[in-house]
Image (cartoon, rainbow, N blue to C red):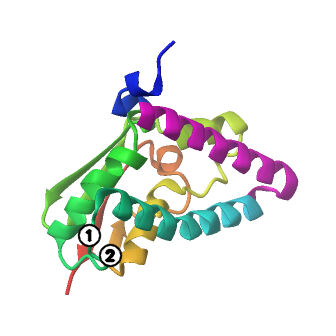
Amino acid sequence: MKTLNELTKEELIELENSCWMTHDGMWFYSCLNNFGIETTNMLNKSAIRGLAPFEIERTKKAIGFEKDKLESFEDFKAYFTMAKTLFIPPFMNATMSFPRQNVLHWSFEPNKCFAYKGMRRLGIIDYYECGVIFRIECWLDYFGIKYTTVPKIDKCLMHTHGECAGDIEMFFP
């Protein structure tokens, strides 16, 4: 048996994220069974938006990131590069990159997005409103960054378009 000191940073991040995502999935499933998909989608997005300030402030404190406002794309890249390591683990099958100035590009491996697989298993993929990219949009909202997401996401892109990929273009003063 390993001690905590013997676990690698990556193993700890994977463990914490796996437990968190299982909680998230069970919460979603419980809401779905009690309230239906429309209310569950609304509650899910409300919870994601409410979580953003806590995630950001706790992360900033843990890494010593002292800026209250991200004033440039370089500020965003510095914060996001660290945050994605903590909050977008490998099992999510997502790639995040910066292909050009002021643009964050995302893509999920075909048919491997964790949310897509879970919602498909539950049989509600036709009605699920994606919260994955919405979470990043909530981070941007919290930081006060103006942005445009293309394509605009409501339902699951993997389901409706056969792939989930796009760009978030940010506008800094």
Q: How many marks?
A: 2
Which residue is painted at 50% across and 66% down in the image? 54
Q: Who's the residue at 40% across and 39% down the image?
A: 89
Q: Quadrant of the C terminus?
A: bottom left
Displayed quadrant of residue 116: top right
Question: Could you tell me residue 87's position as x and y percent?
Answer: 42, 48
Label 1 residue SS: strand
Magenta region, residue range: 12-37
Asked if the residue at tag 1 contacts the one at tag 2, i.e. Cβ–Cβ closer than 8 Å, the answer is yes
Give me the disc on residue 169: 1
**Occupied quadrant, residue 70:** bottom left
Q: As rendered, which of 6 and 94 lies closer to the eye?
A: 6
Position of residue 40 relative to residue 139, above or below, is above
| Residue type indicated by callout 1 | Glu
Sequence-wise, the earlier of marks 2 and 1 is 2
Left or right: 51 as drawn, with respect to 173: right
Magenta span includes 27: yes
Give the residue furthest to the right: 34
Q: Is residue 21 magenta?
A: yes
* Residue 152 seen anywhere in this rendered image of the structure: no
Where 67 falls versus 86 (above or below)? Answer: below
Q: Residue 53 location, x and y as percent?
A: 48, 70
Give left or right: position of 36 versus 59. Answer: right
Question: Which labelled disc corresponds to residue 64?
Answer: none
Q: Which residue is mark 2?
A: 147
Q: Residue at x 45, y 48 (%)?
A: 161
Q: Is residue 52 left or right of residue 59?
A: right
